[in-house]
Image: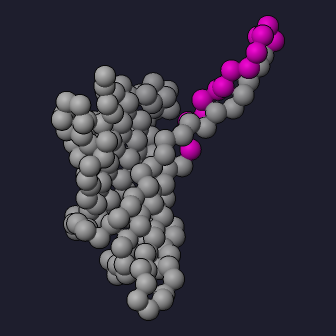
Amino acid sequence: MALPSKLKNFIVFEDGVSYVGEVPEIQLPKLTRKMEAYRGGGMNGEVDIDLGMEKLELGLTMGGFMKEMFKTWGTSKVDGVTVRFAGSYQRDDTEAVDAVEVYVRGRYKEIDPGKAKAGDNADQTGTMSLAYYRLVVNGETLIEIDFPNFIEMVGGVDRLAQQRRALGL
């Protein structure tokens, strides 16, 4: 019997500052391809044509008021804020531990300070629009996406190299 690797603990860093104990939840970026259905003459059904990636977003839930999040509000750089997620995933059958890191760069498109009620938990949330994403497992980069620089590396394969060459980039 095999058991899955489960998240046992994590920490979040923003622009190099550790948020240990301050982030109860993070919504890691969802990877989505933009697809368009196509059926041409002589085809007995549709296929999806890959038109690139959908936008990437990251969501943070802070355990209280975090002024650091507000300090980066309105940055004009598409990659003005750097966030790093470091997670420890472990299997309960073999005890094997995987170090999973997600590096993103982007900027906040929404900061919600939440409800203010005396004596109540007041979570603050933020949503970032991302220009860069990198997934690293046990030191191996599995995926690296850099929208402004037209880079999409998956499993060591540069998926956009031929397109960059065709465009003279």
Q: Is residue 115 left or right of residue 83?
A: right
Q: Which residues are magenta?
A: 41-54
Residue 132 percent coordinates (x, y): 39, 49
- The residue nearer to you, when weighing 107 against 76, is 107
- The residue nearer to you, when weighing 62 against 72, is 62
Magenta run includes residue 13: no
* Residue sitting at x 45%, y 70%: 125
Among the 4 quarters of the image, the one containing residue 160? top left
Residue 115 percent coordinates (x, y): 51, 83
* Residue sitting at x 24%, y 40%: 90
In this view, 124 is above or below 120: above
In this view, 98 is above or below 119: above
Residue 119 percent coordinates (x, y): 40, 89
Residue 4 percent coordinates (x, y): 33, 33
In this view, 80 is above or below 89: below
Q: Is residue 5 left or right of residue 114?
A: left
Magenta run includes residue 48: yes
Residue 8 seen in the current view: yes
